[in-house]
Image: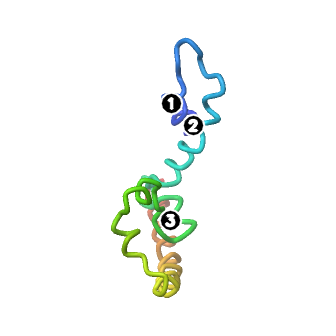
Amino acid sequence: MLLQGLKPRIFNRLNKFGARWVAELPTVLWSQKTTPSRSTGYTPFFMVYGSKAILPTDLDYGAPRIRAYDEQGAEASYQDAMDQLDEARNIALLRSAKYQ
């Protein structure tokens, strides 16, 4: 999967691959971590951290999620998200089994 993501980014007819893959690897990894899986319906990032990833463009352009962030309520929200994460993991396990 990594090679499939890297190939279109680094292919150049004059200089086949060179060292461009090193610069492109973090972008490809990030895209794989933030793309929902067909089998589970969740992103790998969500399955580990229990929340959606904040994209760099969200930070640059001030997405509503970024502007609405409240430091005071973040801890309570975090606890709720951790409770929901166990349920989401169970759902993902069932979806994965059904997919296979």
Q: Position of residue 10 (x, y in %)?
A: 54, 27
Viewer-proximal residue among 10 and 71: 71
Dot 2 lies on which element?
A: helix
Name the mark nearer the viewer: 2 or 3: 2
Residue that badge 3 annotates: 46
Q: Give amino acid for label 2.
A: Glu
Residue that badge 1 annotates: 9
Residue at position x 53%, y 53% in the image? 33
Which badge, 1 or 2, comes first in the chain's sequence? 1
Which badge, 2 or 3, comes first in the chain's sequence? 2
Spatial separation of the CA atoms under disc 1 and disc 2: 7 Å
Are dots 1 and 2 in contact, CB under 8 Å? yes
Spatial separation of the CA atoms under disc 2 and disc 3: 23 Å
Spatial separation of the CA atoms under disc 3 and disc 1: 26 Å
How was this image coloured?
A: rainbow
Q: Position of residue 47 (x, y in %)?
A: 53, 65
The furthest residue to the top: 14
Dot 3 lies on which element?
A: helix
Q: Is residue 2 above or below residue 13?
A: below
Tell me if mark 2 has few (under 14), some (14-19) or many (20+) residues whose alpha carbon lies within 10 angstroms of its own.
some
Q: Give amino acid for label 1.
A: Arg
Tell me if mark 3 has few (under 14), some (14-19) or many (20+) residues whose alpha carbon lies within 10 angstroms of its own.
some
Which badge, 3 or 1, comes first in the chain's sequence? 1
Q: Position of residue 43 (x, y in %)?
A: 48, 59
Residue at position x 48%, y 69% in the image? 51
Viewer-proximal residue among 58 and 37: 58
Name the mark nearer the viewer: 3 or 1: 1
Q: Give amino acid for label 3.
A: Phe
Residue that badge 2 annotates: 24
Q: Is residue 18 above or below residue 93?
A: above
